[in-house]
Image (spheres, helix red, strand yellow):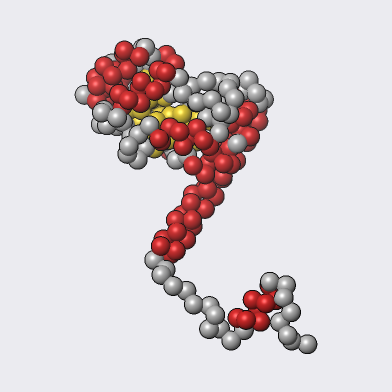
Amino acid sequence: MKDIINRVVGQDIIVTVGPSSYNSFSIQRMDELGATCFRINLSHTELQDFVPILEKMEDWTEKPICPDTQGYQFRPRNVSAFTDKDLEVFRASKGLNVHTVFLSFCSYPEDVTELRSYFEYDTTVIAKIENAEGLRNLPSILEVADGILIDRGDLSKDVPLEKIRYIGNAACAGAELALLSREKRKRTIDIAKNTQYFEIATHPDFHDQYAENMLFDSGKK
């Protein structure tokens, strides 16, 4: 069965834990069948239950257990992407070895940056695209997020369902380009850090080219 799932899906398998699956048999069986990580949806989890659920699941699986923020479906750009419940979970998560967070209703790249600011260590951020604003800002979100999840349920309120597949394909292509760009930027930064001095004025054509590009008369006729 695991081989069949891997052949059909061919990607990471994210399992959302709910009341019917919150038991050792279900978690361990899904783990065996290839689950990549388990997601706890804070919109359907009471704050006081989050830590006990996570600690119990850690006894059942070694796969990452990730909070999925509650967030706000609609909000102005200068308002935080996170509810008070989200912030409480972030505080609790730092002591519970949580390194991956799903960011609900990610609308702007600043949402990803804000989420990272709540953790003192590297955190994997999966941005969930669930509204028209997130879709409009998808290219810039791809630049800063570690992954993208297209939520067709909520997104279908703003985008016809038949078009969402094309959005997913575009997101995959954009993620590949963003990864390449990120790697090239890192390479450029590394080169700059390791370069102490770069002499260009010794080139015989330097002064002529400099004057030409500064729109000065180089003296040549």
Tell me: 196 left or right of 163: left
Closer-to-camera residue (210/132): 210
Tell me: 124 left or right of 181: left
Residue 48 position by quadrant = top left
Closer-to-camera residue (215/194): 215
Closer-to-camera residue (170/185): 185
Q: Is residue 13 visible?
A: no
| Residue at the (30%, 23%) spot, across then down | 92
Tell me: 34 left or right of 149: left
In the picture, the quarter occupied by the C terminus is bottom right
Please tell me whether residue 162 is drawn above or below residue 211 in the rendered image: above
Give the residue at the far left of this rendering. Answer: 59
Please tell me whether residue 28 is drawn above or below residue 125 in the rendered image: above
Q: Is residue 65 visible?
A: yes
Please tell me whether residue 33 is drawn above or below residue 73 in the rendered image: below
Closer-to-camera residue (25/8): 25
Please state the total of marks drawn on the protein image.
0
Residue 206 position by quadrant = bottom right
Q: Position of residue 181 (x, y in %)?
A: 52, 53
Q: Position of residue 39 (x, y in %)?
A: 38, 25
| Residue at the (32%, 39%) spot, across then down | 121
| Residue at the (29%, 30%) spot, across then down | 94
Q: Position of residue 125 (x, y in %)?
A: 42, 35
Tell me: 188 left or right of 33: right
Q: Position of residue 116 (x, y in %)?
A: 41, 36
In the picture, the quarter occupied by the N terminus is top left
| Residue at the (47%, 39%) spot, across then down | 145
